[in-house]
Amino acid sequence: MDAKALDKSFKKYLAIFTADAELAKLLNRVSFQDLFNPIFLTANSKFTSMDDLIWRSGFGIMNLMEVEQVNQDKWNEYIAQNTECATWHEFGKLAMVEWMKLALEAQKKAEEDKSESDKEA
């Protein structure tokens, strides 16, 4: 997905989540582990886990909270070489979009299941 399409998609899903109180609560609780899960990483990068991404970087960081401490140009170069995105920021947006899509699908399924069980009662 190119950067403009990704930005448009990100804004679309973010608007959906911020407009709904329950979805906004989910969004506020999302973690790095939720976003950069093995399925997302395998589909969108050369990595299988966040530990894999961090250790193979060679930057000497121990977790994602330390990413801000490394040279951002070099980090973005590393991300561009090993993911579907040109920058770390873009990779994060992609992770957010994918997570929001899955969260909406899960919410829709839960509502459908509830509707079905209400009909049966």
Image (cartoon, rainbow, N blue to C red):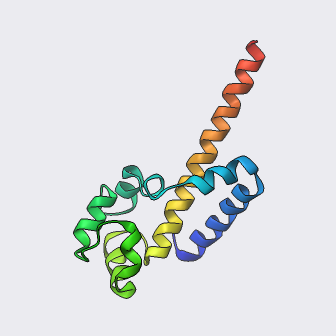
- Residue in view at x 24 percent, y 66 percent: 55
Q: Where is residue 113 in the image (x, y as percent from the top left)?
A: 66, 26
Q: Is residue 21 above or below residue 58?
A: above
Q: In which quarter of the image is residue 61?
A: bottom left
- Residue in view at x 49 percent, y 56 percent: 31
The one nearer the camera, 66 or 98, is 66
Q: Position of residue 63 (x, y in %)?
A: 34, 65
Q: Is residue 38 above or below residue 61?
A: above
In the drawing, does residue 47 fall left or right of residue 100? left
| Quadrant of the image containing the C terminus | top right
- Residue in view at x 49 percent, y 73 percent: 90
Q: Position of residue 28 (x, y in %)?
A: 62, 56
The one nearer the camera, 94 or 71, is 71
- Residue in view at x 63 percent, y 65 percent: 9
Q: Where is residue 106 in the image (x, y as percent from the top left)?
A: 60, 40
Q: Quadrant of residue 4?
A: bottom right
In the drawing, does residue 33 fall left or right of residue 18? left
The one nearer the camera, 98 or 32, is 32
